[in-house]
Amino acid sequence: MPIYEYQCDKCGHVTEALRSMAQADAPIACEGCGAGKTKRRQSEFAAVGSKPGGSSAPSTGGCGRCGGPHGSCGM
């Protein structure tokens, strides 16, 4: 089952939930304030691959967050 992220319309808190694809768009109670007004949001992820010689780096060649060529953006 995939992990989905939901953002609360009331307080802005982001809640993660392991749910079936059939339940993906159903609202879920906010972990921050308990309100039931959440919406599924686009999840962010970083892909990491191996380079010859055993080192690892993001597959985009830079920061996994902003895609910058000089590593972590510090966000």
Image: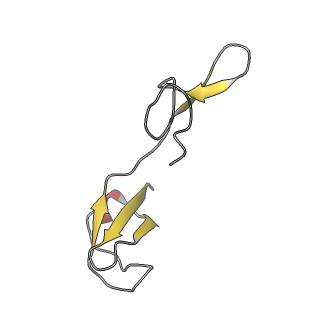
Q: Quadrant of residue 50?
A: top right
Pick the front one: 31 or 3: 31
Total labels drawn: 0
- Tell me where residue 23 appears, x and y as whole percent: 31, 66
- Its colouring scheme is secondary structure
- Say which quadrant the N terminus sits in: bottom left
Residue at point 34%, 78% (across, down): 11
Left or right for 53, reference 62: right
Image: 73 above or below 4: above
How far across and down, in percent of the image, does residue 56 sit? 65, 26
> Residue 7 versus residue 17: which sits nearer the camera?
7
Among the 4 quarters of the image, the one containing residue 5: bottom left
Q: Residue furthest bottom?
A: 34
Residue 17 picture location, percent across and down? 44, 66
Where is 59 relative to 1, above or below?
above
User: Which residue is found at the position 26% from the left and 74% from the top?
Assistant: 9
Q: Which residue sits at x=36%, y=80%? A: 29
Q: Nearer the viewer, residue 32 or 5?
A: 32
Residue at 49%, 25% (x, y): give it. 69
Where residue 32 appears, as percent x and y from the top left, is 44, 80
In the rendered image, the residue lying farthest to the top is 52
Indicate left or right for 56 with 13 as reference: right
